[in-house]
Amino acid sequence: MSDAAGTTPRTRPGRAAVPPGRAAVPAQRVPARRVPSVPVLVRLRLARDLMDRCYAEPLDLDTLAREAGFSRYHFAHAFRAAYGEPAGAYLSRRRVERAQDLLRSADITVTEVCQLVGFSSLGSFSSRFREVVGLSPTEYRRRHWAEQAPLPVPGCFVLAWSRPGSAIRPGSATQEKPGGPPAG
Amino acid sequence: MIKRISHVTVYVLDQDSAKAFYTEKLGFTLTGDADMGDGIRWLTATPPGQPDVEFILADCRMGHDAETAEQLRALVAKGALGPGVLATEDCQKTYEELSGRGVTFVQPPTERFYGIEALLRDDSGNWFSLSQRSAAPSA
């Protein structure tokens, strides 16, 4: 019963009426990010704080949504709208940031680092690490030790200044890819 | 010549709540609370141990048009703003004290090359580092 394509002028589907199914939104243009209201942001922050605090635990979307007091669906959408990346991507970025710290300071294996910061597999750890940092964990550690000097920036600011997207360091080989969600 | 810093501005979502939080939980001393009209107050408090620096606990509407104020409120609420570092002589002890009073920490005391640091949030969403500097190497 769908209309023959292209016979009618395009109308925008009513936003509120979309059921929580997976209606594929034809996304040619990037919709302007709508910042959630202040009360919603406050609740989303609770979930984000939980990730900052308990990054090493196996936090899933249900747990995070519960922390914020939203349904999974609402939480996932609102989080992304507020912070520019899916909650899962934020969590894994936080874990990578913690891993960087351990690689710089602790004399433990990459596998141990991987487990300590909450990744369940070495493969996902390595690929996410490379995506965020631009180097493999081993290369990262080697370079750090070669350069020796600690980064003269307090850790709180390192975390606060890391941001969605990949490879902060300029000039690392490759990509400038549009921020595709690295699947939370 | 500039002599020192005397005031810092911290934007808050609710001045009543901020007043209670900063004085009762963080142990600040209230130094000013005056009506400026439109429901906005000049609200100031000093950190314990530093009576010559006042925190202006500012309503986001202060000095801003409605749209800017709302953007500012959103930034505070989502936890994007970190006004600074609070110094302590014993990070672990202060962490326990403040946690006991219900202050939210996003990071427990953690060793860094410059000392021990924890991260806390105020009641609005602003984050502060709570840092205990390592003894400076004798020069």
Image (cartoon, coloured by chain):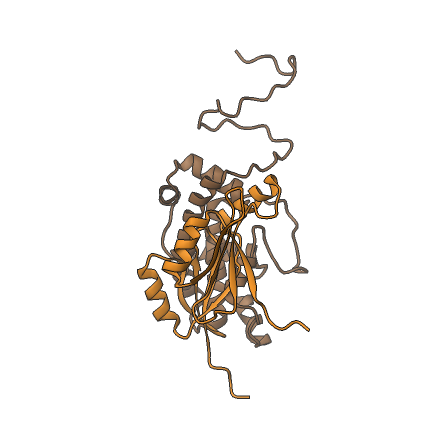
Chain colours: A brown, B orange
Classify residue B47 by image quadrant.
bottom left
How many discs appear?
Answer: 0
| Residue name at image x 60 percent, y 56 percent | A167
Tell whether B81 sits left or right of B27.
right
| Residue name at image x 43 percent, y 39 percent | A75
Q: Position of residue A150 (x, y in %)?
A: 55, 74
Tell whether A183 sits left or right of B27.
right
Nearer to us in this view, B41 or B84: B41
Nearer to us in this view, B4 or A8: B4
The residue sitting at the left extreme is B100
Q: Position of residue B100 (x, y in %)?
A: 30, 61
Q: Position of residue A179 (x, y in %)?
A: 60, 45
Q: Position of residue A30 (x, y in %)?
A: 62, 35
| Residue name at image x 42 percent, y 63 percent | B28
| Residue name at image x 50 percent, y 60 percent | A97
Classify residue A143 by image quadrant.
bottom right
Nearer to us in this view, A156 or A150: A156
Answer yes or no: is residue A51 visible: no
Answer yes or no: is residue B101 visible: yes
The residue sitting at the bottom extreme is B139
**Vertical relation: A18 (above or below) B22:** above
